[in-house]
Each structure stands twice: as structure tokens, then as C-alpha cells.
Amino acid sequence: MTLLTIGAFARASRLSPKALRLYDELGLLPPARVDPVTGYRLYERGQLERARLVAWLRRIGMPLARIAEVCALPPGAAAEEIRAYWARVEADTAARRDLAAFLVDHLSRKDSDMPTSTTEPLGIRYAALCDRGLVREANQDTAYAGPRLLAVADGFGPSGARASAAAVDALQQFDAERYGGEGGTVPAGELLNALQDAVADAVTGPDPAGTTLTALLRTGPGAQLALVHIGDTSVRLLRDGELFQITHDHTLVQSMVDEGRLTPEEALTHPRRSLLVRALGAAPEGDDATALDLRPHEARPGDRYLLCSDGLSTVVPENDIRRVLTGTPEPEHAVRALVDLANAAGGPDNISCVVADVVPAHD
Ligand code: MN
């Protein structure tokens, strides 16, 4: 068989010799033979297809290590892997878009010449309830509701209870001390640092511990809220008779659903469904492991919000949650009914619930 020189192979594959040498060094595309005397790389014509695949995968931004994995797979499995990679890129982009929107909002409101979206003052009616459940020995959840802050946190590990309380407390301090004034806004980086410090201080002992946190923080007298979220506690919004979750779970199974590797139905019963990929404190491995989702959320009169821990959402079917929220006007009664449903289903985990209704301020 005739071997192609690196120059000829580069022309045929539309890749530069420099790129080909890099792919060789990385083990992505070793030449068929290296001349022992000159050290020149020689390629077979049959390697063109692999060369083109590597080049295309580089164009879509796939990391080199992952390209190596894809190249080692048969075509069907390689296609599946590329599809999963792209789904992850889109999910990450959506999260970054939310953060960008938050920053735009934050900076726009610092600029007094920019029109603001602040509307008529809104009032809020709320209730919080936190319950140990029927199985766990301790309650590591924290639930809080006040006129400017709604929050739930689900602690884990030996000092999980302290971690969840510290996270909610830090958010409360943040609000009251520094950003209680009219038009106050929440700087993302400062918020994350304050939360991480508070949780780190609360976690003691050698064993890993940490917490999730999901909160709505009012940033002015109007309808503008900041949604702060990490982990698998969640927010549901009942608006115009529709109930939808407005947070994205940071769990292994949700990542698998995002990537099309698991259906939402399969996720409900997956044995590792409670495994977190992000949390405050003893976070899992990875660059984004302690990254909060932070975005603005515009409330409307008539909105009803449910913040809850997985002790409710993984135990009580969505339809039953909807039925309680639509049929129980008083927030106090609604949180009681939801906790009772979780306990009626066995109460396997701690349960925290906050229900809040947005009303015109004069009500
Ligand atoms: Mn839990």
C-alpha cells in the first residue's frame, strides 16, 4: 500500500501538517508509520475519514479527551456520544444566558438613566413548614419565609443541619444588612462568596457536609425577584392555572435527562436520583460544583410559589402537589397539607415547604 507523506495527507484531509502532528501527539490520529531514519510521519489513505472526524469534532468545540473517546467508538455509539455532548453544551449555554440576563439587569439598574421595570408595590402572603418526616433521625432541612426572602435548604453529611441553616441565614443577612434599601440589587459574585463562607464556617468535623439552597429574594418594592438556586431543592410557580418548575435540578439524573440518556419517567425511579452534581460546602468534583444559578424573576399579582426540598418533590406526585396548590387558598393550610401528603407516602426524607402568594400591596 502506498503511504502518503504528511504534506499529501494534509492536502487530502484539508488539515494542516501542524494539526496532524498535534493529533499524533495527543494519540487521536497516529500515523500508519514513522520513517525510522527521517522521522517523517506517513499515513494511509484509509485514515482520511478519522482525520476529518477529528477536525469536525474540534470545530464543534469538543475537548480533545472526549474526541479520543468518540473516535474509539463504533459509528452508532459515536453518534450518540456527539448528541449527548451537544445537549450538554446547550444546557450549559442556557444557564450562562440566565446569568448574563441577571448581570444585564443588575448593571442596568445601577445606571439611573436606564428605565427600570419596577411596577406598583406588591404584597406577599406566605407560610413555611419544615418536618423531620417519618424515617430520618434528624431534620437537616431549613425552610424560611419572610416579607423579602423565601428559602429552603437541604443539608447533608454530619453537620448538614448547620450547613442548611447557615446558608439561609447568610442570605437573610445579605438582604437585611446591605440590600434592604429601595432599588437594591444583588451582586452575583459577592452573594456566592458570602454563601460559601457561611456554609464553610458551619461545616465542622472531618466528614464532608454541605447543603442545597433555593431562594427567592426581593430586590426592591416591586415585582423584581432574584432567584438563587443550587442543588435539588426547587421552585414551582402556579400562574394562570399552570404549574411549572422554574429551577433546574443539579442532579446526576437531570444531567442524564438533559443529555437524552434517561427519560424523565426513568429518572423518577433511578437508584441514584438524589446524587447531586452541585452543592454548597462539600461539593462534588468539578469546576462548576459550587456555581449558583442566579437570575432575575419578575413576579405577578396572582402568582403562587412553592419552594420545597426533595423530601416533598420526589415522594408526592406532581398532580397531587398541583391539586393542593390550586385548592388550598391559605398558605398555612397548603404547607400543612403538602407535608401531610409526604408523610402519608412514608415520609422517607426531611420535608420543607414554603408557599407564597403575590398580591397587590393594598390587600
Ligand atoms: Mn432531602
Image: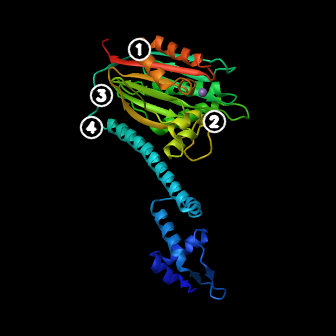
Toward the right, the furthest residue is 206
User: Where 85 sits versus 171, above or below?
Assistant: below
Q: Tags 4 and 2 in contact by the CB under 8 Å rule? A: no
Instruction: Judge depth for marks 4 and 3 and give the one in front.
Output: 3
Give the SS element for disc 3.
Answer: loop
Q: Position of residue 294 (x, y in %)?
A: 45, 36
The Cα atoms of the two marked residues, 1 and 3, are separated by 31 Å
For the residues labelled 4 and 1, say whether their Cβ atoms are less than 8 Å apart.
no
C-alpha gap between disc 4 and disc 2? 50 Å
Pick whichever of labels 2 and 1 is earlier in the sequence. 2
Q: Amino acid at mark 1?
A: Gly
Q: Element type at marker 4?
A: loop
Query: What residue is at 56 percent from the left and 39 percent from the top?
Result: 253
Q: Secondary structure at mark 2?
A: loop
**Which residue corresponds to mark 1?**
327
Q: Is residue 8 above or below residue 202?
A: below
Label 2: how many Cα within 10 Å (few below 14, some 14–19, many 20+): few
* Residue 271: image tag: 2
Q: Which amino acid is tagged 4?
A: Met
Which residue bears the numbered disc 3? 118
Q: Nearer the viewer, residue 227 or 35?
A: 35
Residue at x 59%, y 19% (from the top left corner): 345
Q: Amino acid at mark 2?
A: Pro
The location of residue 33, given as percent across then percent down, is 62, 81
Q: Earlier in the sequence, mark 3 or mark 2?
A: 3
Q: Which residue is mark 4?
A: 114
Q: CA distance from mark 3 to mark 2?
A: 45 Å
Relative to residue 114, is residue 82 drawn left or right? right
Residue shown at 43% from the left, 45% from the top: 96
